[in-house]
Amino acid sequence: MKIHAIQTGTVEIKKNQKIGKGSGVGRLINMLFGREWIEPALPIYAWVIEHPEGIILVDTGETARTAETGYFPRWHPYYNLAVRFHVKPEDEIGAQLRKMGINPKDVKKVILTHLHTDHAGGLSHFPESKIYVNLPEYQRTNGFQGQVDGYLPQHLPRWLEPIPIEFNDELLGGFTKVWRATTKGDIKVVQTYGHTPAHVSVIVESEDVQYFLAGDASYSEQNLLHKTADGVSPSPKQAIATMQKILALAKQRPLVYLPTHEFDSAVRLNNKTILSV
Ligand SMILES: [Zn+2]
C-alpha cells in the first residue's frame, strides 16, 4: 500500500480564517474583512492510496475552472473578499493521475472529507468511481442555503449520486463511529465534525503507523496541537472537541497527521513523521 500527496494548486486565505478570531458573527466578519492574508498561499492536497483492493482517492482537489469569470456566485462575500484560487489545468487531479500512470477510470472509490469546492472540485474526473460522502454533508450543499454556506451545488457533476457512508459503533481513540472502507479494514473513516457539521477524516493503517488524512479538521498540525479552531467552522467548540479526539487517537498508536492545506503534510508523509503528543 502506498499513499501519494497530489497538490492541485494553491489557495490564498485570510489569517483570520486559518486562526479564527472572535466569536459568533464577529468571527465571520473578522475573517471576511481581515487585512492579512496567509503567505505563501496554502496547498490544496488530495490523496491517492494504492491499495491491494483497488485505488482509493481521498478528496479530489480543486478545478482550474475557478479561474473562469462567474464561476463563483458574485454576491457571496467569502468568494469576493476572502479567497483566491490558483489552479492550472495541469494541476487538476485527473491530469496528475495520468502523469502517474493511473487512469482516473481505475479509481475504485473516492471518499470526500466534505464538499467545499477545494475538496470536491475535481469530481468531474470520476464519473465511473464510487463516490462516498457523509449524507448530512451532501444534504447541506442543497439549494440556495447550500450556496450561502459556501458550497457550490451548481458545479457538482449532474451524474453525482454519492453513496452514503455507513458508520458502525466502534471505539477508536476518541471516536465512537467508524466506517471501514476496505474489506481488510485498514482504511477507516471517522466523524471529525467542526469545520463543517458532518466533516469526516480518513485513517490509513500501515504496519507501524496510522496516517490521518484530516481534510480540514484543522488547517495545520500546530492548530491541532494548540486546539485552534479555524474562522469558518460553524461551531468552534465542536471543532476543538474533534481535535481532542484526534489527539487521543495519536496517544494510542503512532500517527502521521496530514491536513489538506499544509505543505508539511507532504513532507511528513514522505518522512513518516509521527505527531508528538
Ligand atoms: Zn473546507
Image (tube, helix red, strand yellow):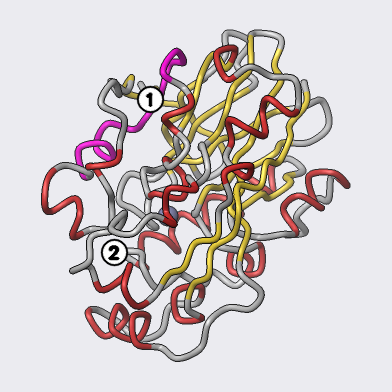
Q: How many marks?
A: 2
Look at the image and say whether residue 186 sits in the magenta stretch: no
User: Magenta part of the protein: which range?
Assistant: 127-140
| Quadrant showing the C terminus | bottom right
Q: Residue at x 47, y 37 (%)?
A: 122
Furthest residue in direction bottom, as rendered? 35
As displayed, is residue 14 above or below residue 233? below
Q: Residue at x 52, y 43 (%)?
A: 61
Residue 71, position in %: x, y?
A: 31, 54
Mark closer to the chain start, 1 or 2: 1
Q: Residue at x 57, y 50 (%)?
A: 246
Whether residue 248 is visible, yes or no, is no
Mark 1 or mark 2, which is nearer to you? Answer: 2
Q: Is mark 2 within 8 Å of ligand 1?
A: no
Look at the image and say whether residue 128 sits in the magenta stretch: yes
Q: Which of the labelled discs sits on residue 167, or is there none? A: 1
Most foreground residue, 150 or 186: 150
| Quadrant showing the N terminus | top right
As displayed, is residue 24 above or below residue 122? below
Q: Secondary structure at mark 2?
A: loop
Residue hosting label 2: 234
Picture quadrant where residue 132 is located: top left
Instruction: Describe residue 104's horizontal placement relative to residue 145 as left or right.
Output: right
Please tell me in which quarter of the rendered image ligand 1 is found: bottom left
Whether residue 75 is visible, yes or no, is yes
Q: Secondary structure at mark 1?
A: loop
Most foreground residue, 168 or 40: 40
What amino acid type should be assigned to the residue bearing mark 1?
A: Phe
Instruction: Describe residue 10's horizontal placement relative to residue 51 as left or right.
Output: left
What amino acid type should be assigned to the residue bearing mark 2?
A: Pro
Q: Residue at x 59, y 59 (%)?
A: 10
